[in-house]
């Protein structure tokens, strides 16, 4: 049984993340989307909001589970008995951070492999930050995030303006 973890902040989930989730779910028996509760970052969405959005959007994928975690990814992977970490690569700018992260995790937990999946061309520019930036100026984000997520982001920025 190959259990993989796809970790990230997912603040919020974008079409780029969903694309990786769909493709990765075909490569393993079980895929756990690990939503990072990072106290150092100041996320737009709470951990519960992020988990609930992703759960709704992946409910049709039978081998995908959504869980939140805090602390080290290697500890979460050990706890879940996962053998593989999935990460997405968009451009060379992702590479430097990602290789450092993968190698530190490998030193800590040698049985754990990190698999990089290249972004689909049409989402290679896309990040949660881009989606939030456009939404903050009232821009069209329909090409960035699924329709269910749009009103949730808009509500955040409308509240901020008040
Ligand atoms: P983190 O804060 O850990 O970088 P993100 O939510 O930004 O979390 O991203 C989670 C993972 O998804 C990372 O591996 C990131 O490279 C990948 N990812 C984000 N956007 C895309 C995209 N458009 N295409 C492919 N992979 C992506």
Image (cartoon, rainbow, N blue to C red):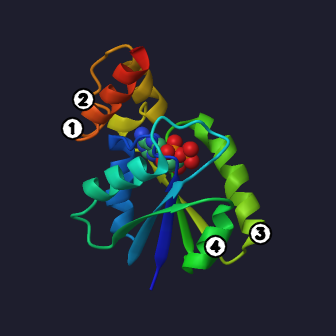
Q: Are marks 2 and 3 in contact (CB under 8 Å)?
A: no
Taking the spot 32% from the left edge, 42% from the top edge, the residue there is 15
Q: On the rendered structure, is 70 left or right of 103?
A: left
Distance in Å between CA atoms under marks 3 and 4: 9 Å
Indicate which label's residue lies in the foreground, 4 or 1. Answer: 1
Name the residue tied to disc 3: 108
Q: Earlier in the sequence, mark 4 or mark 1?
A: 4
- Does the residue tagged 1 have its C-beta within 8 Å of any atom of ligand 1? no
Residue sticking out furthest to the right = 107
Q: Are marks 2 and 1 in contact (CB under 8 Å)?
A: yes
Q: On the rendered structure, is 96 left or right of 162?
A: right
Distance in Å between CA atoms under marks 4 and 1: 35 Å
- Does the residue tagged 3 have its C-beta within 8 Å of any atom of ligand 1? no
Residue sticking out furthest to the bottom = 1
**Looking at this view, is 90 or 40 the one in front?**
40
Distance in Å between CA atoms under marks 2 and 3: 40 Å
- Which element carries disc 2, helix, strand or loop? loop
Q: Position of residue 133 (x, y in %)?
A: 44, 21
Q: Earlier in the sequence, mark 2 or mark 3?
A: 3
């Amino acid at each position: 049984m190959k259990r993989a973890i796809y970790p990230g902040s997912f603040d919020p989930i974008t079409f780029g993340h969903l694309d990786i989730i769909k493709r990765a779910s075909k490569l393993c028996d079980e895929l756990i989307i690990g939503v990072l509760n990072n106290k150092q970052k100041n996320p737009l969405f709470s951990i519960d909001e992020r988990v609930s959005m992703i759960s709704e959007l992946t409910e049709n994928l039978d081998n995908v589970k959504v869980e939140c975690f805090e602390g080290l990814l290697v500890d979460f992977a050990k706890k879940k008995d996962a053998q593989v970490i999935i990460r997405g690569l968009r451009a060379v700018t992702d590479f430097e951070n990602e290789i450092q992260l993968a190698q530190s995790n490998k030193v800590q937990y040698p049985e754990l492999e990190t698999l990089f999946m290249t972004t689909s061309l049409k989402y290679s520019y896309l990040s949660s930050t881009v989606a939030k930036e456009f939404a903050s100026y009232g821009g069209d984000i329909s090409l960035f995030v699924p329709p269910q997520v749009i009103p949730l982001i808009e509500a955040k920025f409308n509240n901020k303006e008040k």
